Structure formats: structure tokens, C-alpha cells
Image (cartoon, grey):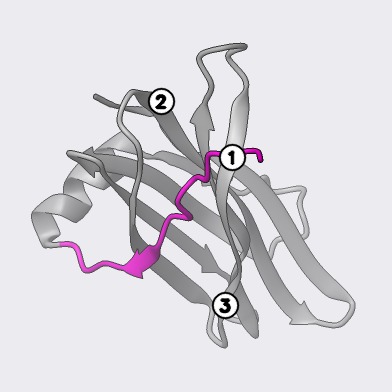
Amino acid sequence: MHAFATEKIPQWEDAEFTEEELAELYALGTEFVANERATGLIQHGRLAVSNNGTTLYIYGELCCTTEVKKCGFKEIVVQKKTTANGEWVNIFTYEDLYADSPCYSVQKSLGVVAGYYYRVTCIYYAKKNIFSVQKIEATSNIVHIS
């Protein structure tokens, strides 16, 4: 008979941040302004993580041109850094977060295990029509959960 350790699957929840919390996340996060030579659908985005104890708070925002019909995140991936080899390991993936508008934001919280570094990666997505789509990959700041 073999005994296997099972890892609890994290639960991803909607979160509502106060103006103060959003300002703090804004200061921590990474922001980009789209390259002028790109397709021009995505104007700017922001991705940030912070924590309170073992709760990870995630904020993502994307703003596109007014002609965009579908805007959001193709995926958002929460990663932790392993101590054994220093690699980033995916622990939670959320896919297809969109709105039928030119701007979209995500506010989420996730319970995580202490003792690791965490970050979030994403793929921003904007669609004007079937022939005009833009995707941009991004990585957030890093937090240590102690």
C-alpha cells in the first residue's frame, strides 16, 4: 500500500479592493504601454500582486482602443518559485477572462502556502474582428509569503 501526499487545490475568488489597496497594487505592479508598431489594439495594461498573510491579491487591467470588441486576459497564471531548483512552477491557471468592451480589469484573491516567492503571468488579449487580434504577455512583480 502506498501513501501519496496530496496538495490542496487553491480556490480563486473575486476580490474588491479599496482605493488605498488599488493604489498600493498600482505602485507594486508592472505596467506597459503598447509599442506604436504593434497592431495598435492594446493601449496599456497593468499586472500586480500583493499579500496579506497567506492570501495573495491579484490585480490586472487592460485598456484598448475604442474599436476593440473583446478585451481581457487569455490566461492568468499564478506561479511559485521552488526552492530546490529556483524554477517558477504554475500552481493555478485561470483562462478566458473577457468583456465585450475596450477596457477590462480583474481583482482576485487566492490562498497560498507560506515560504515561497509568488508572481503572476498573463496574456493580454484584444479583438477588433476575426482578422485583427493582439496578444501581449506580461509578468507581475514578485512577493514573498513568509
Question: Residue at 73% of width from left, 57% of height from top?
Answer: 135
Residue at the limit of the structure toward the front, as seen here:
1
Q: Residues within 10 Å of mark 2 (few under 14, many from 20)?
A: some
Q: Magenta span: helix, strand or loop, mainly? A: loop
Q: Is residue 54 left or right of residue 9?
A: left
Tell me what residue is drawn at x 50 percent, y 14 percent. 83
Identify the disc placed on residue 60: none
Task: Tell me the kind of residue under disc 2.
Answer: Tyr
Name the residue located 53 percent from the left edge and 39 percent from the top edge. 5
Specify whether residue 101 is painted magenta. Answer: no
Give the amino acid type for the residue marked by disc 3 in the picture. Answer: Tyr
Residue 117's disc is 2
Question: Percent x, y for residue 47?
Answer: 44, 48
- Of residues 58 and 38, the one nearer the viewer is 58
Mark 1 and mark 2 in contact? Answer it, CB < 8 Å.
no
- Give the mark nearest the N terminus, 2 or 3: 3
First in sequence, mark 1 or 3: give its number.
1
Q: Which residue is mark 3?
A: 98
State the SS at label 3. Answer: strand
Q: Tell me if residue 88 comes above or below residue 39 in the rendering.
A: above
**Residue pointed to by mark 1:** 4
Mark 2–mark 3 Cα distance, whole angstroms, equals 28 Å
- Disc nearer the start of the sequence (1/2): 1
Residue 29, given in percent of the width and then of the height, sits at 37, 39
Q: Nearer the viewer, mark 2 or mark 3?
A: 2
The region drawn magenta spans: 1-17
User: Which of the 4 image quarters holds residue 50?
Assistant: top left
x and y, in percent, of residue 117 in the image: 41, 25
Q: Which one is in front in this view, the residue at disc 1 or the one at disc 2?
A: 1
x and y percent of residue 11 in the render? 40, 62
